[in-house]
Every structure is written in structure tokens, then in C-alpha cells.
Image: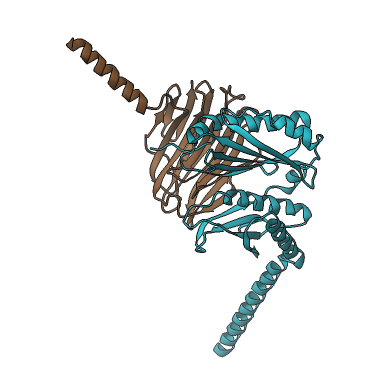
């Protein structure tokens, strides 16, 4: 009788273990199925788009991560030209563009929960890694109305933004596929003191002007870049504002003022 | 003669002091902070109506890590915007980033939270994960974490923000109410301290 009970227990145990293995295998397979060939293809297309825009992506991967809903993370690795632990001046712009491309790929069928960006320096050391939730795609689809203006009239209006003691060297306006505009502002300051004096006012005036042009004139400026340098050509600021996603990214020199964005005090 | 010489020296010293001191602060803070923490969170209010803003710029109300590189989250409001904007901002190794997440109504609270987990700082707004940042430039806990209001450029900007249920996280991951009085206010702004974890920042 005792042997029968032991044998029965053994059978139940084996069956339980078998079921557990089977269930975990099914779960694994299901999770793998989340990354279909279609999804991988979209990720590859994003990579191609990024490379065409000059974003130095060295790898991308799409993987299951149960922390996200949907439980998929797409992560891009960016090759920085930096030789130390600080990012180079273009890296924040690149990181922003990656976020934009992945977010808008949702409208082409990409089904991910989060975007990861890894920045490595010239020694292949990871200097920054961040993971962010994707922007709601329903919201994104509302941000793509074509502009009611042409590029010449828009450029003429943007050239009138006050430069606050600096010099507005060049404004470039270009229309993109979704009918919205990107604009780039090249600004010169005599030196970092002139930049510190003028930059907070300029950034505020620029943002206000662009928001007003979008609101009142239907300009549909979807993003803008500010490239600020001194008389010697040294870069003081490289900044991008992606108005569709609501994300600003920038690099600035250590001696440029911080009085134009929230930052903690020095204790 | 001696009096004149003394006066001249005093004037000269005053002049030199004025040269090395900033003429005026262009950022005003009202805050409390806690040392030796692993996370910080607070329910941060907006005022009843859009606050008056001086010209230019605006204000932000946030919780944050400190140092040359930081992570912070809260709401900001600046001219041209209709609403307060919840945001996450960080600066890691000169990689600056500020992302906004929808709007926060006037006379409303949202919970803003930052804590250290598995080598990085995770940021939540109203319980929803937004960003995780991993960088060796950011402070490693235990560290000092802050809950603050910040006004830029014009001290005529109106501030009226309640911070309540301000908590810090210990090494076990337990959240506790702020229990240190490290309050500070840059005039003309001030605070009403109900507790270390519940205060009203206001002014001018």
C-alpha cells in the first residue's frame, strides 16, 4: 500500500513538473511571437532612417521585457565621438531623433512599450543609458496636421525673432513628409558673457513665437534646432525641441548659464 | 584727512565686493531637503488659477537629486502655456533632456517620484513609470534629495504651491515622511511649514 502511495505521488510530481515546463515553454514561445518579422522589419526601417539622417546608430535590438506594456523594448546604441565620460555636443540631438522615429513608427504598426538609448564613447564604454515609455500613439496622430504656410513666409517671420544682443546668422526652414516644418536657427554671440546675457531671453522668445505661429497661423512647426556658437566658432549650445513628442534635448558648454530651464541649486 | 582716507577705503572695498558678488539672483528657490535618502516623492499642487508670470520665463515645482548632474520631476509653467506641464528632466554627462507629459489642471495635485533602483534612477508621475536613467555621473544613494519651487528671471512671478506627503525612501525601499528641517527660501519668496513633509511655498 505504501509503495502504491509513493508511486502515485511520484507520478503526480512528474506530471506537475512536466506541466510547469510545458507552460513555461508556451509562455516563452508566446513572448517570442510578440516580436514578429513585421516588427523586426519596422525596427530595421527605423535604423535605416536614422542612418540616412546621419545618426550614428551602431546596433538596435527589439526584445521582450515584462516591465512594459506592450512587453517589448526597442533599444538603440549610439556611437558618440566623445573620448571621455561626457557626451559630445551632437549626442542629445541624436538621442532625441531616435525617440521621435520610434514613437512615430507606432503609427506604421510598431508595437513597443519603451524606447532605450545607450550612448557609448570612442572606447565603447557606456556613458549614458536611458529607457523611456513611448508616447501615446493616438496623441501623436493628432500632431501631424499639414502647415497652412509656405516655407518662405514662415522663414521671413522667424527671422524677426529678437536676438537679445546676439546675432541670428541663419534660419533654415524645411517641410517634411507629414506636411509640418522643421527649422534650424544658427546664432552667434560675441563670447560666452554675451550668450549668458541674451540666451535665456532668446530661448523664451523663440519658444513663445513658435507656439504663437503654430496656434494663430497654423504654421505647424513640429521641431526646431538652435545652434549657438561664439565668435571663435566654439559651440556653446546645441538644442532640439520636438514639439510633437514634447521633448527638448540639448548639450551646452559648462560655462553657459543654466537660468533658462529648471535645475537644482548648489547647496 | 584720516576720515576721508577711511571713507575712501570703505568705498573702494564696497566697490570691490560689489564686483565679485552677483548683482541680483536670477533664480529663486524655496525648498526643503533630506540627506541620506534613496528616493523622494511628493504630491505637488498647482494654484487655483494660472499664476501671474513676470517677463520672461516662469516657474517649476519639483523633486530632484542634487549635484552637477541630476534627475528631477515636477510641473513647470511658462508664458505662452495655458496649463502647468508635468515634466521629467535630467542632465547626465552633459546630456540634457526635458520631456513634458500632458497637463496638470489648476487646483490639482499630482504625485512626482524619483527613486534609485538597480543602478539607475526611475521616475514616476502619478504612479506611472516615465523614464529610467542609468549613468555613473548621477549621485549614488544614500544622497541628499530635495523638494523645491524654482522661479526664473523675474521675482514678480507669482508662486503658490503646496507640497504634501513629501517622503524619502530608505535603503530597504520603505517610504517615510520627510523628517528633517532644512528649509530655505530666497526672498521675496517664503514658505509656511506645517510639517517637514507638508509646506506651502508662496510669494512674492
In the picture, the quarter occupied by the N terminus of chain A is: bottom right
Quarter where residue A244 is shown: top right
Q: Nearer the viewer, residue B117 or A63?
A: A63
Percent from the top left, x then y, of residue A109? 77, 57
User: Is the image coloured rainbow, by chain, by secondary structure, or in one colour?
Assistant: by chain
Report the residue that reaches farthest toward the front: A232
Visual hue assigned to chain A: cyan
User: Against B119, is A266 above or below?
Assistant: above
Percent from the top left, x then y, of residue B21? 36, 27
Describe residue B181's horizontal placement relative to residue A134 as left or right.
left
Q: From this viewpoint, is residue A11 visible?
A: yes
Q: From this viewpoint, is residue B83 visible?
A: no
Quarter where residue B17 is shown: top left
Q: Nearer the viewer, residue A194 or A48?
A: A194
User: Against B136, is A194 above or below?
Assistant: above
Report the residue that reaches farthest toward the left: B2
Visual hue assigned to chain B: brown
In the picture, the quarter occupied by the C terminus of chain A is: top left
Percent from the top left, x then y, of residue B60? 54, 33
Amino acid at each position: 500500500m505504501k509503495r502504491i502511495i509513493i508511486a502515485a505521488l511520484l507520478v503526480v510530481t512528474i506530471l506537475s513538473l512536466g506541466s510547469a515546463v510545458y507552460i513555461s515553454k508556451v509562455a516563452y514561445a508566446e513572448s517570442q511571437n510578440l516580436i514578429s518579422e513585421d516588427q523586426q522589419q519596422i525596427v530595421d526601417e527605423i535604423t535605416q532612417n536614422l542612418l540616412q539622417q546621419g545618426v550614428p546608430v551602431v546596433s538596435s535590438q527589439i526584445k521582450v521585457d515584462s516591465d512594459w506594456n506592450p512587453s517589448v523594448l526597442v533599444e538603440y546604441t549610439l556611437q558618440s565621438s566623445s573620448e571621455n565620460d561626457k557626451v559630445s555636443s551632437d549626442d542629445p540631438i541624436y538621442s532625441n531623433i531616435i525617440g521621435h522615429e520610434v514613437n512615430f513608427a507606432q503609427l506604421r504598426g510598431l508595437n513597443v512599450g519603451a524606447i532605450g538609448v545607450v550612448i557609448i564613447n570612442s572606447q565603447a564604454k557606456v556613458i549614458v543609458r536611458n529607457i523611456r515609455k513611448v508616447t501615446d500613439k493616438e496623441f501623436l496622430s493628432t500632431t501631424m496636421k499639414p502647415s497652412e504656410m509656405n516655407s518662405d513666409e514662415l522663414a521671413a517671420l522667424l527671422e524677426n525673432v529678437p536676438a537679445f544682443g546676439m546675432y541670428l546668422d541663419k534660419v533654415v526652414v524645411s517641410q517634411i513628409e507629414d506636411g509640418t516644418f522643421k527649422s534650424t536657427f544658427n546664432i552667434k554671440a560675441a563670447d560666452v558673457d554675451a550668450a549668458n546675457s541674451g540666451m535665456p531671453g532668446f530661448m523664451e522668445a523663440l519658444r513663445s513665437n513658435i507656439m504663437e505661429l503654430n496656434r494663430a497661423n497654423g504654421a505647424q512647426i513640429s521641431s526646431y534646432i538652435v545652434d549657438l556658437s561664439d565668435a571663435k566658432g566654439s559651440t556653446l549650445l546645441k538644442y532640439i525641441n520636438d514639439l510633437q513628442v514634447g521633448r527638448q534635448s540639448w548639450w551646452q558648454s559648462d560655462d553657459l548659464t543654466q537660468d533658462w530651464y529648471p535645475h537644482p541649486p548648489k547647496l | 584727512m584720516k576720515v576721508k582716507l577711511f571713507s575712501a577705503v570703505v568705498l573702494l572695498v564696497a566697490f570691490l565686493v560689489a564686483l565679485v558678488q552677483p548683482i541680483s539672483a536670477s533664480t529663486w528657490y524655496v525648498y526643503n531637503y533630506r540627506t541620506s535618502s534613496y528616493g523622494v516623492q511628493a504630491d505637488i499642487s498647482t494654484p487655483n488659477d494660472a499664476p501671474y508670470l513676470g517677463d520672461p520665463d516662469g516657474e517649476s515645482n519639483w523633486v530632484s537629486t542634487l549635484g552637477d548632474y541630476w534627475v528631477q520631476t515636477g510641473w513647470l509653467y511658462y508664458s505662452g502655456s495655458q496649463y502647468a506641464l508635468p515634466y521629467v528632466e535630467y542632465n547626465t554627462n552633459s546630456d540634457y533632456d526635458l520631456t513634458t507629459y500632458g497637463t496638470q489642471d489648476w487646483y490639482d495635485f499630482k504625485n512626482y517620484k524619483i527613486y534609485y533602483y538597480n543602478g539607475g534612477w526611475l521616475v514616476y508621475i502619478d504612479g506611472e513609470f516615465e523614464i529610467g536613467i542609468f549613468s555613473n555621473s548621477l549621485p549614488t544613494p544614500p544622497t541628499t534629495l530635495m523638494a523645491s519651487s524654482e522661479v526664473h528671471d523675474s521675482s514678480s512671478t507669482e508662486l503658490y504651491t503646496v507640497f504634501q506627503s513629501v517622503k524619502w525612501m530608505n535603503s530597504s525601499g520603505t517610504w517615510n515622511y520627510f523628517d528633517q528641517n532644512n528649509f530655505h527660501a530666497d526672498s521675496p519668496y517664503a514658505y509656511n511649514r506645517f510639517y517637514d513633509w507638508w509646506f506651502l511655498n508662496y510669494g512674492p
